[in-house]
Image (tube, rainbow, N blue to C red):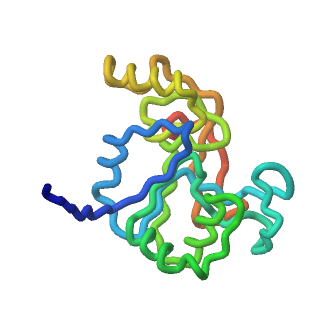
């Protein structure tokens, strides 16, 4: 018997919920040119701490809103950040929400944060756009349909539609003013 071992050099780590559909090929193409110390996702900086319910953060005392974070339905961070976080784990304060924790942990670091509206990862879907790379809040049937449509027609959506607008994150203003929704059709 021969024992094989392989060492894989990862450049990124992605996180997504079990109700998230990700187009890995286009996502990997998008990430191919990125440099180290990067986080990509749909960021928010306006959210006020939850004080009750499933996502309650009773220990949050850093400021009146959460620090900017990539919404947890799906995001990508570079492997150097994964290594840094793993090495720092004993010193990191954990919050109830993984994405809130990630925002707090990455806040003081010199990290390139790329707000990507093609990540439909809010608490409810914005609809279907053929430009989307990651879509949250998808049932198993919806994911299967998207995969069939991709394979048969080369597009994600049988019919594109929008249920709500997206936003561009403005990194030049305080986080509480970061994200104004727009009806501009150039923003997925």
| Residue 39 at x, y percent in the picture | 47, 62
| Residue 136 at x, y percent in the picture | 56, 38
Q: Is residue 174 in sight in this rendering?
A: no
* Residue drawn 64% across the image and 28% down it: 163
Viewer-proximal residue among 171 and 116: 116
Q: Is residue 124 above or below residue 50?
A: above
* Residue drawn 38% across the image and 66% down it: 79
Would residue 41 be found to the left or right of residue 66 on screen? left
> To which quarter of the image does residue 174 belong?
bottom right
| Residue 44 at x, y percent in the picture | 64, 55
Viewer-proximal residue among 7 and 97: 7
Q: Is residue 81 above or below residue 152?
A: below
* Residue drawn 62% across the image and 59% down it: 98
Q: Is residue 69 in sight in this rendering?
A: yes
| Residue 3 at x, y percent in the picture | 18, 60
Task: Please identify the quadrant where the N terminus is shown.
Answer: bottom left
* Residue drawn 55% across the image and 23% down it: 161
Would residue 74 be found to the left or right of residue 99 on screen? left
């Amino acid at each position: 018997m021969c024992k094989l071992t392989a060492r894989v050099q990862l450049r990124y780590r992605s996180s997504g919920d079990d109700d998230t559909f990700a187009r890995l090929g286009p996502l990997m193409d998008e990430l191919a040119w990125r440099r180290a110390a990067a986080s990509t996702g749909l960021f928010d900086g306006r959210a006020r701490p939850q004080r009750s319910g499933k996502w309650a953060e009773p220990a949050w005392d850093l400021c009146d809103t959460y620090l900017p974070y990539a919404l947890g339905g799906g995001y990508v961070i570079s492997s150097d950040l994964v290594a840094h976080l793993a090495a720092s784990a004993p010193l990191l304060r954990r919050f109830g929400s993984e994405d809130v924790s990630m925002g707090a942990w990455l806040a003081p670091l010199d990290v390139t944060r790329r707000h990507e509206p093609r990540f439909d990862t809010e608490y409810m879907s914005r609809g279907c756009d053929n430009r989307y790379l990651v879509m949250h809040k998808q049932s198993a049937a919806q994911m299967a349909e998207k995969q069939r449509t991709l394979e048969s027609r080369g597009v994600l959506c049988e019919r594109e539609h929008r249920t709500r607008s997206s936003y561009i994150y403005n990194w030049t203003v305080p986080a509480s003013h970061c994200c104004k929704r727009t009806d501009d059709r150039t923003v997925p």
